[in-house]
Amino acid sequence: MAFILISIGSNIEREKHVRLAIRELKQAFGSLQISSVYESEAVGFDGEPFYNLVVGANTDLSIEACVELFKGIEDRHGRKRNVARFSGRTLDLDLLTYDQIICQQPIELPRDEITKNAFVLLPLAELVPDQIHPVTGQSYRQLWQHYPKQQKLWTVPFSWSED
């Protein structure tokens, strides 16, 4: 059984798509660890602010199967694949880590954006503060403490009910 960390982001109908992603991830993995939801400015393009969070789960799925599962969830909820890399999206699910595996194929793990984007690192530091980043050897708490806090993000109250 592997422990995985998944980032979730949305800037189109944010609340709806974050709730739907959590629902589908619970169906796939059962119990989830869920960070707070953070709002952040769009990075790399002019667009609506994003909601971002990180989820932890245990799985018997392979890395490839996780990535395919996430693509399927994104596609079912309106993710457009024929648009610019930095653009608005209904749902973005990224596998950040798979246990302590370091690899380039089938995807890069741990994901490079962990150390580059506050909207990934802060939820990680909240959710698994003492877990060690496989490449840097530092905990996510330490990485956040030394992060140059130039990107703006803030916690938002989030209702998990669909009412």
Image: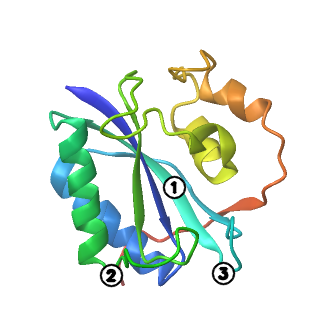
Kind of element beneath mark 3: loop
Q: Please, which colouring scheme is shown?
A: rainbow
**Quarter holding residue 145:** top right
Q: Specify the amino acid type for callout 2.
A: Gly
- Of the residues under marks 1 and 3, which one precedes in the sequence? 3
Quadrant of image for the N terminus: top left
Q: Specify the amino acid type for callout 1.
A: Leu
Q: Is residue 125 left or right of residue 10?
A: right
Q: What residue is shown with label 2?
A: 78
Q: What residue is shown with label 3?
A: 47
Q: Is residue 149 left or right of residue 97?
A: right
In the image shown, does 5 or 107 lie closer to the viewer?
107
In the image shown, does 77 or 86 lie closer to the viewer?
86
- Give the image location of residue 83, x and y in percent: 46, 78
Can residue 155 be seen at all in this image of the molecule? yes
Kind of element beneath mark 2: loop
Residue at 24% from the left image edge and 46% from the top image edge:
66
Q: Is residue 19 left or right of residue 28?
A: right
Do the residues bearing badges 1 and 3 touch, measured as CB atoms within 8 Å?
no
Q: What residue is shown with label 1?
A: 53
Pair 1/2: label in front: 2
Q: Specify the amino acid type for callout 3.
A: Gly
